[in-house]
């Protein structure tokens, strides 16, 4: 009976250690995580490896509880390697623990295992439940336009909407970061694209900018808010949007291309083109582990494989743009968003100064844009735009009231290019939101919600930029008289 109880206790402590990191990660992202499947899958993999190690150690020592406790501690150390600055000390502590565990009496060993199960097994389960009971109020967004019955106008066969995350306007990229825009500008112009050298966004965060484009109206307003529960904005980015529902009602098939960021993962599309396995969720889960440095050296960040894979996924849809059917493709490319880790050919570089590499990363993304831009046919409406600019001036970490003109210019000025079929009206303003509104209103008969055209800094407690100040900043940037 004792051996059987030892076996069950051993399985319990191994399971607790294997699922500790996945469960605490789930608790930290309770309302934002698209699905707990990947964290729990990592827990299953860790549990299987742990059990195999346990069997080997038990066979060698004949001490089941001691072997289980030792393996459990090893798993916890491996998954939380970032907490230990001196690996040799960790090894020494682990050896001491293993020796003590094998020399303790049976009752003491059972007590140690019970403590480990309680701390690393039951506690994170309580955290998951508590996290779901806390912050139940989603991020407050404005009243959205009601979903409408729509029909296709016949002017647009397909729509391709691509977000290039964190790409500044070509004016700012050249003047601030030394990026030569002539090649990408000439390439796009040659394909019939309108290239806006100084485009603008109305929001400073992806989680507000992209949903606003997908709802065809600004979705947030100033006021005291908390950005802890982002389910309201993530739901829009995952496909439950005015744009998607209106286009589908008009007969468009909705393709959603993941870029690796969980906030814009698939949710409500007709067809999902998934990101690589090492997306944001897996990257963050393993970012505390012994494998973190290897991942960084190999991939730079999860943005890199996610972007390259997303570009390939969009290109794989080439035939959809000439098949006579209506298609709507949404893709989110995480590059050139920081960290700046690749050269102009999208090859991962060793760590060095970030600002010095912005130009190279922008050039890498230019190549991705050129490949995607060539997919358009004469009846395809294409919008390729950034959601916000960089933040090399660290403006994300200071209150909105303290932003300088340069900080506002950098964050609001974005890459913007588009191509419409003949017969489509031009956008009302050079902003990503207005271009999206023009695309959709050309493709289908729809009553557009209002756009006040104002600019909002931040997500937590956001504040308006005074219209007069914003106008002055825009004029200065276009004139080249504003610098970091």
Image (cartoon, helix red, strand yellow):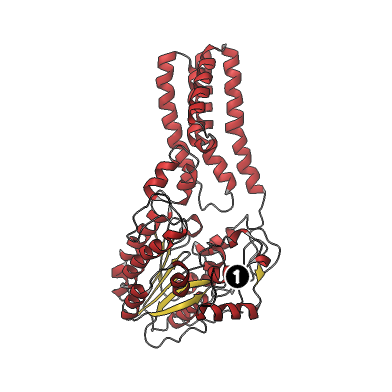
Residue 197: x percent and y percent? 44, 78
Residue nearest the viewer, comparing 472 with 376: 472
Q: Position of residue 358 (x, y in %)?
A: 43, 62
Q: Name above or below for residue 95 compared with residue 293.
A: above
Question: Which image quarter holds the C terminus?
Answer: bottom right
Q: Is residue 451 visible?
A: no
* Residue beneath the point at 57% across and 70% down: 406
Query: What is the x, y in percent for residue 119?
Result: 61, 31
User: Which of these two is toward me, 277 or 253?
Assistant: 277
Whether residue 435 is visible: yes
Give me the residue at 44% from left, 17% from top.
58
As drawn, the residue found furthest toward the right would be 224
Residue 77 sits above or below residue 327 on the image: above
Vertical arrangement, residue 30 with respect to residue 457, above or below: above
| Label tally | 1
Residue that carries the numbered disc 1 in the rendered image: 219
Nearest the viewer among 225 and 469 is 469
Residue drawn at x 54%, y 61% as measured from the top left: 235
Query: Residue 94's spot in the image, x, y percent?
Result: 51, 23
> Left or right: where does residue 327 sit relative to residue 318?
right
Mark 1 neighbour class, 10 Å CA radius: few under 14, some 14 to 19, many 20 or more? many
Mark 1 residue element:
loop
User: With 400 as the anchor, is 341 left or right in this view?
Assistant: left
């Amino acid at each position: 009976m004792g051996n059987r109880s030892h076996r069950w206790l051993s399985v319990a402590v191994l399971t607790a250690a294997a699922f500790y990191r996945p469960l605490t990660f789930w608790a930290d992202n309770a309302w934002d995580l698209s699905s707990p499947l990947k964290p729990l899958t990592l827990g299953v993999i860790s549990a299987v490896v742990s059990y195999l190690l346990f069997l080997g150690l038990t066979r060698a020592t004949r001490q089941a509880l001691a072997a289980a406790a030792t393996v459990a501690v090893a798993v916890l150390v491996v998954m939380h390697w970032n907490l230990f600055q001196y690996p040799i000390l960790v090894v020494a502590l682990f050896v001491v623990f293993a020796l003590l565990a094998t020399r303790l009496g049976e009752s003491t060993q059972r007590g140690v295992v019970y403590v480990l199960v309680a701390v690393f097994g039951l506690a994170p389960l309580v955290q998951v439940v508590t996290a779901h009971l806390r912050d139940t109020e989603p991020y407050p967004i404005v009243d959205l336009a009601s979903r409408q019955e729509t029909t296709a106008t016949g002017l647009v066969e397909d729509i391709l909407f691509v977000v290039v995350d964190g790409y500044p306007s070509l004016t700012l990229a050249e003047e601030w970061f030394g990026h030569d825009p002539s090649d990408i500008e000439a390439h796009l112009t040659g394909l019939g694209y309108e290239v806006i050298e100084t485009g603008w966004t109305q929001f400073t965060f992806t989680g507000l900018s992209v949903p606003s484009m997908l709802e065809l109206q600004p979705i947030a307003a100033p006021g005291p808010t908390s950005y802890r529960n982002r389910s309201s904005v993530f739901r829009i980015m995952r496909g439950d949007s005015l744009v998607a529902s209106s286009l589908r009602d008009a007969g468009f098939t909705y393709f959603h291309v993941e870029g690796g960021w969980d906030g814009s993962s698939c949710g409500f599309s007709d067809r999902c083109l998934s990101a690589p396995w090492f997306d944001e969720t897996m990257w963050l889960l393993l970012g505390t582990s012994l494998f973190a440095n290897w991942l960084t050296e190999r991939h730079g960040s999860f943005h890199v494989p996610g972007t390259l894979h997303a570009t390939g996924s969009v290109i794989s849809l080439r035939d959809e743009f000439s098949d006579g059917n209506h298609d709507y493709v949404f893709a989110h490319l995480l590059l050139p968003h920081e960290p700046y880790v690749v050269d102009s050919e999208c090859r991962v570089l060793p760590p060095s100064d970030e600002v010095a590499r912005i130009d190279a990363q922008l050039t890498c993304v230019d190549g991705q844009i050129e490949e995607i831009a060539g997919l358009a046919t004469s009846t395809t409406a294409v919008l390729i735009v950034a959601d916000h600019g960089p933040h090399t001036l660290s403006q994300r970490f200071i209150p909105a009231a303290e932003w300088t003109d340069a900080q506002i210019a950098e964050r609001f000025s974005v890459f913007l290019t588009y191509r419409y079929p003949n017969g489509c009206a031009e956008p009302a303003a050079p902003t990503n939101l207005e271009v999206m509104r023009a695309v959709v209103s050309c493709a289908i008969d729809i009553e557009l919600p209002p756009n006040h055209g104002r600019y909002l800094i931040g997500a937590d407690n956001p504040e308006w930029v005074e219209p007069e100040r914003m106008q002055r900043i825009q004029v200065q940037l276009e004139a080249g008289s504003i610098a970091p």
